[in-house]
């Protein structure tokens, strides 16, 4: 099977920042060059040390850990305190009290990946009502009017890319399935929408099912096994995030269907990368969470230092496509996720 690895840039109306160079510098552990036009410098605002809180979707996920690495590096550069806290599993019920408790500590800004695009509106709005700027990073809200900025990846395009890869590998014939996290997650909902929109373009392909795994790889794995048993013409599974993809791939492998059922996944933590190199996963849509974290801290700093005009309200970063063929290429591998803050 041949799927060509290439860097895909999305094309809808949102504004892009090309962050590859910045992310590369961060991932190599080097500070970004000072003097980038519009970059704030710590010395200009030495009087107050701001407290900026970053609440990820969950603290144990390498995607968010890598975001934290990027945010921490930028915070150190700007001379602000970055406070990282969150739940250890994906849950709006667990995230909400953490957000509420954070408000009581009166931070200067909140950066957050809301785990539900409606349920987190009220807790986040309470910050805005208290005069604290809120920036969504990765996931966002349905009603974005209260946000100072929303930073994410091009999720719709990532879903389209996954569909294209499976379709090409399967010679544009057969049934596919989606294993998603849960409804109401802005990022993964868009990935699924992009995947389904692209699949509609293939007259000889059908979508057999969409399953939800609650961000649990064990559930994703059993979903994959059940899908394989139920749909004899299954040629592909799209796992819309890290745990969905990992579980889907393990299910395909356990059923002895490697090379017969193509897995397209999202993200790039070590277990997924190993499955990609083994050819169990065919492609991974890799995001740039370090750049997302960096931009979020930068925007918060600008909001707090009278430079709101510099903030782009909506930023979608491009994805990188990793394949079994290009996984060892350093230009691709530098985007693989970190496991330690
Ligand atoms: O895919 C990422 C993130 O973009 C998504 O919003 C939730 O899942 C991940 O954290 C991966 O587990």
Image (cartoon, rainbow, N blue to C red):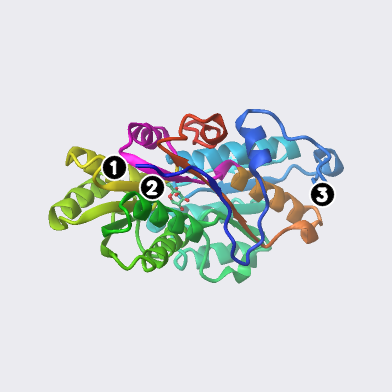
Q: Position of residue 153 (x, y in %)?
A: 55, 54
Q: Residue at x 20, y 42 (%)?
A: 257
Q: Determine crowd level at label 3: few under 14, some 14-19, many 20+ residues with C-alpha closer than 10 A.
A: few
Q: Which of 219 and 84 is in front in this view?
A: 219
| Quarter placement of the N terminus | top left
Q: Do the residues labelled 1 and 2 touch (CB within 8 Å)?
A: yes
Looking at the rendering, the stretch of residues picked out in magenta corresponds to: 268-290
Element class at badge 2? strand
Is residue 88 among what the camera can see? no
Residue that carries the numbered disc 2 in the rendered image = 265
Residue that carries the numbered disc 3 in the rendered image = 38
Q: Do the residues labelled 3 and 1 touch (CB within 8 Å)?
A: no
Compare marks 3 and 1 and give the one earlier in the sequence: 3
Task: Give the CA distance from mark 3 to mark 1.
Answer: 44 Å
Residue that carries the numbered disc 1 in the rendered image = 249
Compare marks 1 and 2 and give the one earlier in the sequence: 1
Q: Determine crowd level at label 2: few under 14, some 14-19, many 20+ residues with C-alpha closer than 10 A.
A: many
Q: Nearer the viewer, residue 208 or 113?
A: 208
Q: Position of residue 203 (x, y in %)?
A: 32, 68
Tell me if residue 129 comes above or below residue 73 in the rendering: below
Compare marks 3 and 2 and give the one earlier in the sequence: 3
């Amino acid at each position: 099977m041949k799927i060509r690895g290439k860097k895909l840039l999305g094309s809808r109306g949102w504004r892009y920042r090309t962050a590859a160079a910045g992310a590369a510098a961060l991932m190599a552990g080097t500070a970004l060059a000072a003097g980038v036009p519009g970059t704030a410098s710590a010395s200009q605002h030495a009087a107050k040390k701001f407290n900026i809180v970053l609440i990820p979707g969950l603290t144990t996920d390498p995607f968010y850990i890598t975001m934290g690495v990027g945010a921490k590096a930028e915070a150190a550069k700007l001379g602000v305190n970055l406070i990282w806290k969150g739940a250890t599993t994906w849950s709006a019920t667990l995230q909400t009290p953490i957000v509420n408790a954070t408000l009581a500590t009166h931070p200067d800004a909140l950066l957050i990946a809301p785990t539900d695009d409606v349920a987190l509106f009220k807790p986040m709005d309470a910050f805005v009502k208290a005069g604290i700027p809120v920036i969504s990073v990765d996931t966002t809200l349905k009603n974005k009017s209260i946000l100072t900025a929303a930073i994410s990846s091009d999720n719709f395009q990532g879903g389209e890319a996954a569909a294209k890869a499976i379709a090409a590998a399967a010679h544009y014939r057969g049934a596919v399935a989606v294993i998603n996290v849960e409804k109401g997650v802005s990022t993964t909902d868009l990935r699924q929408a992009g995947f389904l929109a692209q699949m509609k373009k293939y007259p000889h392909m059908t979508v057999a099912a969409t399953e939800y795994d609650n961000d649990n790889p064990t559930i994703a794995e059993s979903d994959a096994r059940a899908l394989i048993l139920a749909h004899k013409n299954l040629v592909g599974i799209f796992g819309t995030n890290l745990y969905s993809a990992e579980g889907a791939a393990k299910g395909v492998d356990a059923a002895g269907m490697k090379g017969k059922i193509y897995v397209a996944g999202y993200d790039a933590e070590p277990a997924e990368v190993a499955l990609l190199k083994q050819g169990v996963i065919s492609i991974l849509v890799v995001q740039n969470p370090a750049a997302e974290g960096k931009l979020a801290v930068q925007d918060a700093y600008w909001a707090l230092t009278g430079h709101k005009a510099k903030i782009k309200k909506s930023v979608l970063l491009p994805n990188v496509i990793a394949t079994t063929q290009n996984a060892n290429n350093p230009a691709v591998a530098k985007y693989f996720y970190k496991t330690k803050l």
